[in-house]
Image: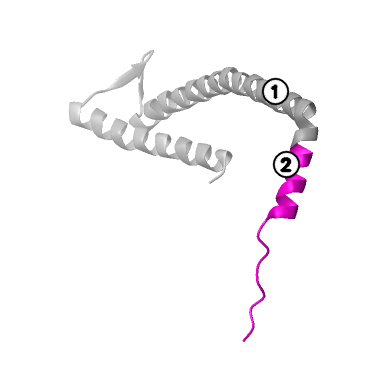
Amino acid sequence: MSFIKSLILAIMATLFLTYVLGVSFIEMLDLDIYMGNELIEPLQAISISAIVMVILVLVALAIVLSVFGSLIFIAMLLLGGCAMMMIGIFWPILLVAVLIWLVARDKPKPRYN
């Protein structure tokens, strides 16, 4: 599953669970939420908090991915650089080893029916 598809499914699941659990929690405790002097509907109160939480999760995800993504990128650059240096230094030995392997390997026997 791709990252974007997983992210969208996680956001939808978060919104759904927040709505279901939030409405049942508000109805179970018989809460009334007021903003100023106006009564806010339970769906609107929960949707506002759910949207705020999704935005906070996305911001945290961006921060985590940028920090760990840059660390992983730096580690991959270092490993790739070391691998290229080793190949650059030892290429004659690798070439001789591949030639010996090609000459000395067991050749498959032909099958006759």
Asked whether, in this view, residue 17 is left or right of residue 65, the answer is left
The quarter holding residue 91 reads top right
Q: Of 46 and 1, which appears nearest the observer?
A: 1
The quarter holding residue 96 reads top right
Q: Position of residue 107 (x, y in %)?
A: 68, 63
Element assignment for label 2: helix
Residue lying farthest to the bottom in this orientation: 113
The residue lying at 31 percent from left, 30 percent from top is 22
Residue lying farthest to the top in this orientation: 36
The amino acid on which the numbered mark 1 sits, given as a three-letter code, is Cys
Q: Which mark is residue 97?
A: 2
Q: Position of residue 24 (x, y in %)?
A: 25, 34
> Which comes before the other along the chain, label 2 or label 1?
1
Q: Is residue 36 magenta?
A: no
The amino acid on which the numbered mark 2 sits, given as a three-letter code, is Ala
Q: How is the image coloured?
A: one colour
Q: Which mark is residue 101?
A: none
The quarter holding residue 4 reads top right
The residue at which mark 1 appears reads as 82
Q: CA distance from mark 2 to mark 1?
A: 20 Å
Element assignment for label 1: helix
Quadrant where the C terminus is found in the figure: bottom right
The residue lying at 45 percent from left, 37 percent from top is 10
Q: Of 110 and 9, which appears nearest the observer?
A: 110
Q: Residues within 10 Å of mark 1 (few under 14, many from 20)?
A: few
Please say if 94 is above or below 108. above
Q: Position of residue 97 (x, y in %)?
A: 73, 41
Q: Of 8 and 2, which appears nearest the observer?
A: 2
- The range drawn in magenta is 94-113
